[in-house]
């Protein structure tokens, strides 16, 4: 029997909160991958295209275009948080306790709960469905988010379970975590996808909510230990794309071997609708995706530091 058919550890501390698992991903590491999205993130990047991932608890989303105004959600809500008549279906987020009673009776699936608790065995079973694609493409599983390091015990258990089944692993991280967490998991990680946004700490705090000293120190430590790392830089016009920030990133990477590969991720609009579903405002509505010419120019600046640059993940 193929050893990859066995389950991984299944203990109380190895249960985690996931908001999505996507198969056949080609943008989250090498080859064809399964990407497991963890719920919760210590950063609140203004451009985040997965805002449903930011809050650690399960989140309620409402697809207004699916709502048939049947009133079933208002009838079942124990907190009186859902409007009737002229405000039919609208949720008062101050009253809502995310009990998710409304999602159970929403026949049109307009109301959905984002976030589900899984054991390692349950998550591993979903990951293993894509094993034939891993074998053919050199792919594997990528743990992303949100921020997987926030659930360090669950992440470690999943990494160990995947490694035991011969599945290659990658962790996509913002790096904002105690080094102790990274130190526990790094032996079980084949590749780190490490986000760098802004090298100036004050600007980083302005746009993400946290400073970057911890992020930079953790990246230095991973490099010092010789881990395979791909640095990923989101190119947000007017935020991260200025020549000074690009120069600082290039200089830092050139001075921190073995960091050599950088992926440039162009800003896109795909997550904007999610903010409305979460009843949240989006602050970058006037920002437009960078042109191909702009992305090429940034790539050339980084290549001048001796880096290998790829546009896109």
Image (cartoon, rainbow, N blue to C red):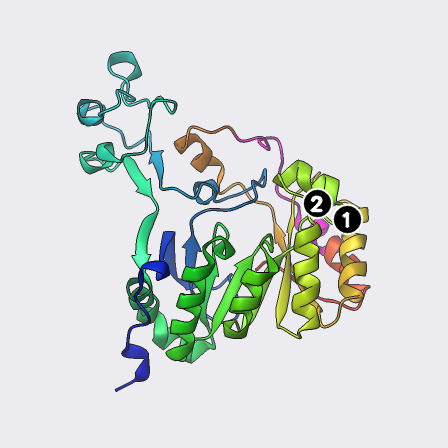
Q: Earlier in the sequence, mark 1 or mark 2?
A: 2
Which mark, by number, is residue 166? Answer: none
Displayed quadrant of residue 302: bottom right
Determine whether the residue tagged by mark 2 lies in a helix, strand or loop: loop
Residue depicted at x 69% and y 48%? 212
Would you name the residue on which mark 2 appears?
240
Residue depicted at x 19% and y 37%? 104
Q: Nearer the viewer, residue 90 or 121?
A: 121
Q: What separation in Å lies between label 1 and label 2 (alpha carbons)?
A: 6 Å
Residue depicted at x 28% and y 33%? 66
Displayed quadrant of residue 126: bottom left
Determine whether the residue tagged by mark 1 lies in a helix, strand or loop: helix
Which mark, by number, is residue 245? Answer: 1
Q: Nearer the viewer, residue 109 or 280?
A: 280
Please identify the residue farthest to the top as the structure is shown.
86
Q: Which residues are magenta?
A: 282-297
Pinpoint residue 178: horizontal percent, then vertical percent: 59, 56
From the image, give the main secondary structure of the stretch colored magenta. Answer: loop
Pinpoint residue 198: horizontal percent, then vertical percent: 71, 47
């Amino acid at each position: 029997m193929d050893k990859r058919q066995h389950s991984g550890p299944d203990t109380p501390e190895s249960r985690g909160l996931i908001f999505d698992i996507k198969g056949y991903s080609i943008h989250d590491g090498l080859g064809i991958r399964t990407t497991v999205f963890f719920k919760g993130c210590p950063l609140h990047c203004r451009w985040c295209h997965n805002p449903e991932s930011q809050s650690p608890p399960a989140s309620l989303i409402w697809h207004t275009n699916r709502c048939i105004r049947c009133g079933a959600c208002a009838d079942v809500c124990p907190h009186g948080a859902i409007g009737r008549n002229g405000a039919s279906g609208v949720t008062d987020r101050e009253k809502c306790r995310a009990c998710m009673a409304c999602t159970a009776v929403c026949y049109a699936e307009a109301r959905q709960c984002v976030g589900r608790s899984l054991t390692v065995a349950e998550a591993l079973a979903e990951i293993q469905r894509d094993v034939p694609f891993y074998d053919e493409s050199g792919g594997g599983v990528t743990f992303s988010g949100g921020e997987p390091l926030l659930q360090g015990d669950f992440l470690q258990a999943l990494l160990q379970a995947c490694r035991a089944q011969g599945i290659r692993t990658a962790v996509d991280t913002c790096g904002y975590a105690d080094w102790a967490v990274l130190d526990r998991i790094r032996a079980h990680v084949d590749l780190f996808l490490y986000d760098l946004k802004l090298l100036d700490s004050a600007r980083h705090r302005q746009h993400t909510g946290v400073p970057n000293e911890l992020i930079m120190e953790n990246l230095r430590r991973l490099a010092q230990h010789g881990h395979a790392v791909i640095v990923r830089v989101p190119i947000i016009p007017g935020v991260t794309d200025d020549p000074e920030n690009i120069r600082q990133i290039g200089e830092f990477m050139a001075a921190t071997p073995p960091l050599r590969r950088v992926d440039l991720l162009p800003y896109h609009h795909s997550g904007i609708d999610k903010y409305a579903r979460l009843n949240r405002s989006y602050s970058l509505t006037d920002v437009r995706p960078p042109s191909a010419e702009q992305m090429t120019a940034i790539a050339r600046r980084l290549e001048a530091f001796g880096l290998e640059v790829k546009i896109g993940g």
